[in-house]
Amino acid sequence: MKRSDRITAVVVLTALALVAVAWVVVHQTRGTVAVIQVDGRVVATVDLRSREPQTLHIAGVLGPLVIAVDGEGSIRVVEATCTDQICVHTVAARSPGDQIICVPNRMVITVEGEGAGIDALAQ
Amino acid sequence: MVPVVALIVVGAGLAAFAALRGSPGPVTSTYFLMDTVLTVTTTGGDAAAINEQLHALASGVDKLTSYYNPESETVRVNAGAGRGPMSVSPEYSALLKAAVAVEAIDHGKTFDIAIAPVSALWGFSTKDFRVPAAKEISETLAYSHSDQLTIADTTVQIQDPRARIDLGGVAKGYALDVMEEYLHTVQPQPQQVIVDFGGNLLLYSGGRKRDWKVGIRDPRGQGIIGYVRSGDAFVATSGDYERYFERDGTRYCHIIDPLTGYPGTLNQSVTVITEIQPLHGAIGDALGKVFFCSTAETQRSLFRDVQNRGVVGIVIVDAAGTQSTLGPITLVPAAAQ
C-alpha cells in the first residue's frame, strides 16, 4: 500500500467514525438518571432504572446529606443538617424534570431523561 | 491529490455531524437566589448569554426587594418605619402599588405585604419554628396590615414603627416580569425560554408556541396530578407542601392568613396562570396567596373579578385533596397521559 493510500484510508475511517459518533449522540435514548449537583458541580449521577436500592452520602456546602435510591425508580433526601428541612419534605423524585433542592447545602437533584410529557412543572 | 480527497472527506464528515446534530439543543443553567433555585432553559439565540443576563436581572430584583439584603429598598424603608416618608425608586413604588392593588380585591383579607411581623412570630424568617400564643398573634396582627403604608410615586411611609414590608409574596413573580421584558428585546430571539424560579414559571416563545404543557405538582403524593395547556404565560403556585413545619402532628405552612394570623389551612395548592402583560408575573404570584387563603365560594366570586384582567385560569387542590379549575382551562389527569 502506498503512503498516500494509507493517509486516505485513515482520513476516510476518521470521517466515518465522526459520522458514527454523531449518529450515536443524536439517536441514543437516555434512560432516567438523577443528576446530583452541589454548588453547580455534578457530584453524582444515579441510574434510576437500576433495581438495586442504594444510599448515597453527599457532602453539601453546609454538611452531609443522606440520599436514598429505592431500586424502584425513586430518589429522595432522607437526612440533611439544614434547619428548614425543605429537601427532606420534598417527595421522592422519579419523573424527568422532578427536582429536589436544598438551598442551605446548595444541592440540587434533577431527574433527567425522555418521556416527561410536560414542558415545565408548576410547584 | 491526497490532501484534496482528505479535505473533501473530512468536510463531508463534519457536515454530516452538523446535520445530524440539527438545531442547537437547550442550554440549562441553575442559580441559587432568593432562598430558592432559579433554573433557566433556553433554546436558540445566544442561549448561554441569555441565561446569564436573566440571572443578573433576577439578582437585581432580589437586591431591590429583599427583606434581608441591607442594600435593598425594603430594608431601608423598614428601618425608617414610624419616622416619616422614605424615598424609594419609581420601580419600587410601582411594585408596591401592584401588590396592594391585589390585596384590595379581597380587602386585604387573604394577602398582605405587611404580614411579616406575624410570620416572624412563627419563625418563618429565622427558621426557628414555634407556635405562638394566641395573644401574641392578635397583638402583632393589630399593626401587621398594609393600611400602615402610604405609597406615593417616590416615597413610602410606614406609620407604626413595628410594622414591616415584606415583598417575598411577589418578588419571584416580579423577577419573571423583568426577565420577560428583557426577552422581548434580545436579538437574536431565542426559540423558547423556560424560567423556573422556585416553581414559579415564565413560559416564553415570543408568542410562537401556544401549547405548553404545564405539569401540576401533586401536593401530597409523588409526581404530578396532571397538566394544563397554555400559551406563553406566567404560572405561580402557592402550596403548603414544601415550606412548613410540624408540631404535635399539625402542619404549619409558611403562608400566613392575614385575617387570622395563622397559617392557611383551606387549600393544599393553588396555581395561577396569567397572561404576558406588564406586572402580571407579580400579580399572579400575589393572587396565588389570595386564592390559597380563600374558601371555594370566595375563590369563585374573586375569579369573576379577575378573569378579564389577564388571569387565564387557576388550578386548585383544596384541603381535602379535591381538584378543581377556574377559567377556560382543563386539568388533564396524569393517568390519561
Image: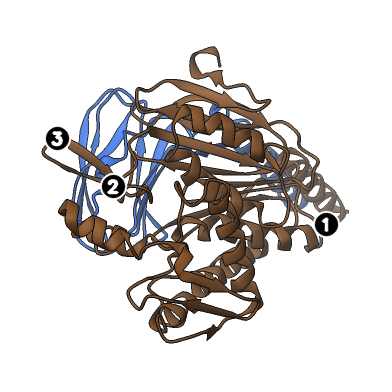
Chain colours: A blue, B brown
Circle 2 sits in a helix, a strand or a loop, which is it?
loop
- For the residue pair A59 and B144, the one nearer the viewer reads as B144
Pointer 2 chain: B
Three-letter code for the amino acid on which mark 1 is drawn: Pro
Pointer 1 chain: B
The percent coordinates of residue A13 (x first, y second) are: 68, 41
The percent coordinates of residue A26 (x first, y second) are: 64, 35
> Label 3 belongs to which residue?
B249
Mark 1 or 2, closer to the camera: 2
> In which image quadrant can residue A53 be found?
top left
- For the residue pair B202 and B300, the one nearer the viewer reads as B300
> Label 1 belongs to which residue?
B3
In the rendered view of the protein, which quadrant contains the N terminus of chain B?
bottom right
Which residue shows up at 32% across the image and 47% down it?
B260
State how far apart marks 3 and 1 are (Cα): 78 Å
Q: Residues within 10 Å of mark 3 (few under 14, many from 20)?
A: few
Three-letter code for the amino acid on which mark 2 is drawn: Tyr
Q: Is residue B301 left or right of residue B34?
A: right
* Mark sitting earlier along the chain (1/2): 1
Three-letter code for the amino acid on which mark 3 is drawn: Gly
Mark 3 or 1, closer to the camera: 3
Are discs 1 and 2 both within one chain?
Answer: yes
> Label 2 belongs to which residue?
B262
Which residue shows up at 37% across the image and 71% down it?
B163
State how far apart marks 2 and 3 are (Cα): 16 Å
- For the residue pair B83 and A113, the one nearer the viewer reads as B83
* Mark sitting earlier along the chain (2/3): 3
* Mark sitting earlier along the chain (3/1): 1
Which residue shows up at 66% across the image and 76% down it?
B153
